Amino acid sequence: MERLKNTLVDRNIKPTYQRLAILRYIYDNRIHPTVDMIYDDLLRKIPTISKTTIYNTLEMYIKKGLVAPIVITGTETRYDTSEGSHHHFVCERCNRIIDVEMKCSLGGRRSVNGHLIKEIHCYLEGVCRDCLSAEEQEKND
């Protein structure tokens, strides 16, 4: 918790209990949660927390580079730690979003065809290994 507190202080964010709880949730639950997921889980521990607090805190974290919004399906925003460059795999069966380490063909380039690159987002879609394994298990039963 002290590390998270220092992370907030280093970015000139007052480390309130709710802000720390939200950041800790995202770091401890690498499930790329939605606001509703964060709210539902934190409400049990912090009955006074509101969705507005979560939205406002996440917006601040995005501006300060602590978290990154992920919009893959176009219907919901998920949140990810902004630690290191990585891509995402979306399982079409269980809807999980899984971090994937792979090389991007653009490498560390800052531009392509004269266009300035600020961000690169890549996602893959298919069936995750857990769902494939469960499917194989059902076939064998």
Image (spheres, rainbow, N blue to C red):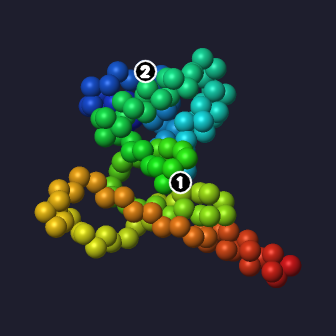
Dot 2 crowding, Cα within 10 Å, few <14, some 14–19, many 20+: few
Residue 74 visible from this viewpoint: yes
Q: Where is mark 1, residue-wise?
A: 73
x and y percentages locating residue 100 in the rendered image: 45, 65
What amino acid is labelled 2 in the image? Thr
Image: 108 above or below 46: below
Q: Residue at x 64, y 33 (%)?
A: 40
Q: Residue at x 81, y 75 (%)?
A: 138
* Most distant residue in the bottom direction: 140
Give the foreground label among 2 and 1: 1
- Asked where in the image residue 122 lies, by quadrant, the reply is bottom left
- Judged left or right of residue 116, residue 20 is right
- Asked where in the image residue 119 lies, by quadrant, the reply is bottom left
Quick one: label 2 or label 1, which is nearer the N terminus? 2
Q: Quadrant of the C terminus?
A: bottom right
- Judged left or right of residue 38, residue 115 is left
Q: Considering the numbered disc 2 on the image, is that residue within a helix, a strand or a loop?
A: loop
Image: 89 above or below 4: below
Depth check, front residue: 61 or 1? 61
Dot 1 crowding, Cα within 10 Å, few <14, some 14–19, many 20+: few
What amino acid is labelled 1 in the image? Thr
Q: Considering the numbered disc 1 on the image, is that residue within a helix, a strand or a loop?
A: loop
- Judged left or right of residue 104, residue 89 is right
Q: Where is mark 2, residue-wise?
A: 16
The answer to whether the residue labelled 2 contacts the one labelled 1, judged by CB atoms less than 8 Å apart, is no
